[in-house]
Image (cartoon, helix red, strand yellow):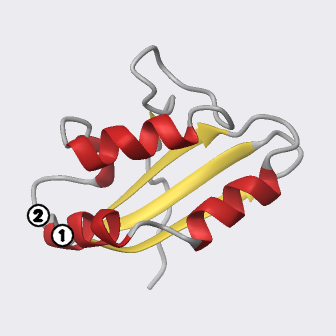
Amino acid sequence: MAKQAFKMKLNPGQKEEYKRRHAALWPELIKLLHDTGVSDYSIFLDEETNTLFGVQNQDGAKSSQDLGGNPIVQRWWAFMADIMETNPDNSPVSIPLEQVFYME
């Protein structure tokens, strides 16, 4: 199992809305993530910079960041586009992070 980490950017003042939308994460999106081997998925917010840090386990060839061709993911991106920094296709601007330390 591999661990993936990435960062994204939340628009200022959108913390509560981001939390609200994720508290009601669509069941079909959860199923898609589980079916592709994504688990133990957390997102943290640095409120000083509005930077979101995502960390997830990946048991398979794809992480959540590789599912952009799926219509469920595309709908989620469109749903979230008004509160995040996005690319022209509504995908969140997401930057992979290199693991530089691990302790079990």
Q: Name the residue at 80% across, 59% down.
A: 16
Q: Name the residue at 39% across, 65% down.
A: 56
The secondary structure type at the circle numbered 1 is loop
Give whichever of 94, 27 is nearer the camera: 27
Please state the horizontal and vertical placement of residue 33, each as a whole percent of the image: 26, 65
Q: Amino acid at mark 2?
A: Gly
Please determine whether, in this image, residue 96 is positioned above or below residue 40: above
User: Residue at the top extreme?
Assistant: 88
Q: Which residue is mark 2?
A: 60
Image-quadrant location for residue 88 = top left
Q: Is residue 48 left or right of residue 99?
A: right
Quadrant in which the N terminus appears: bottom left
Please state the horizontal and vertical placement of residue 28, each as a whole percent of the image: 28, 66
Q: Which residue is mark 1?
A: 37
Give whichever of 104, 53 is nearer the camera: 53
Q: Is residue 79 left or right of residue 63?
A: right
Q: Is residue 67 visible?
A: no
